[in-house]
Amino acid sequence: MKTKKILFLYIAGVLLIACKPTSNKQIEGQESVVTEKQDGLTAEEQECKEYFDSILDSYEEEVIVVVNKSDKYDKMDEPDDKEGFITIVDKRNGERYSEAPREYINDTLLIDSLQKIAKTAETFIKWYINDNCPIDQDKLFTFSETLGYYIFDMKYGEFYIKELQKTGIVSDSLIRSLRRYFEQSKVDMETMKLGYETDGVIGYDADIIFNSQDLPTPLTVQKMKIKRFDFWGENISVTFDCGSAVRLFYENGEWKIISGGF
């Protein structure tokens, strides 16, 4: 009995030492590291991070844990038939894409925040692909009879950018990227001096927004269904069953388009 009592006191002493509060100096050092990391983010980036986390938090709470706020729902293994299911891939921690955590959810169970993001992506695709879309990439490049070679039309470039901005769902970062691209295109055209006989404007035959030569038709995108959400570092990519994809970034309180792909 005495031996047990001594052993108990010894263990208690070890636990007391192990649980001793961290010194003030250590705490200050840890706090300074966290502060430095947070200080490295702009206010917009911090807001983006917080909102981004809230989407996954609400996804876990509303979709994974419960269905329609009442019925219990367990996480699913990959379904054999993915028809009617949406894949959600969390790539934020930098894993290889094939190893990134993913969930499979019935398309009727999406939370409001993800539905809104998907709607923004869908709206942009349908606007851009529509035959009545006011912008035409081909008009960015014109043949100058005076100079005798193709030039980049900066005036049309400004019109192109303004029409994108008028949609209200294109990010400032995409606009800045396009401006840089247009400036470089102007220099490239003046350097290459491509003659009228050139078969296509070399290097500019792919769509500059979706980085593709073969865009879907307006009919193809009329009844798009969400196929996958990819959560990246600070943005979300939405992929549809027609092969179209749009990446969005949280900017000024809203999710805005930063790029597309097919």
Image: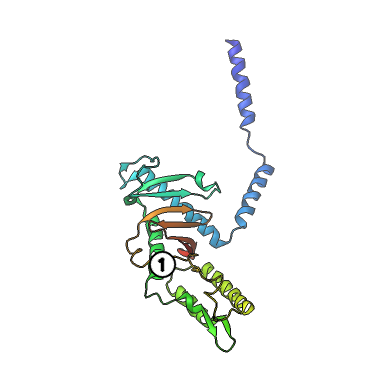
Q: Quadrant of residue 216?
A: bottom left
Q: Is residue 31 above or below residue 133?
A: above
* In the foreground, 16 or 198: 198
* In the foreground, 262 or 14: 262
Q: Quadrant of residue 16?
A: top right
Check disc 1 and report its element: helix, strand or loop.
helix
**Image location of residue 255, percent across then percent down:** 45, 62
Q: Can you name the residue that lies furthest to the bottom here?
A: 146
Residue located 63% across and 20% down the image: 10
Q: What residue is pinned by disc 1?
A: 124
Number of callouts? 1
Residue located 52% across and 50% down the image: 92
The quarter of the rendered structure image containing the N terminus is top right
**Left or right: 162, with 203 as reference point:** left
**Image location of residue 248, percent across then percent down:** 47, 61
Residue located 52% across and 81% down the image: 142
* In the foreground, 45 or 77: 77
* In the foreground, 149 or 22: 149
**Left or right: 177, with 81 as reference point:** right
Q: Amino acid at mark 1?
A: Phe
**Left or right: 160, with 185 as reference point:** left
**Image location of residue 3, percent across then percent down:** 61, 11
Q: Can you name the residue that lies furthest to the front here?
A: 197
Q: Is residue 220 above or below residue 76?
A: below
Q: Quadrant of residue 12?
A: top right
- Label 1 crowd (10 A; few <14 / some 14-19 / many >=20): many
**Image location of residue 195, percent across then percent down:** 57, 81
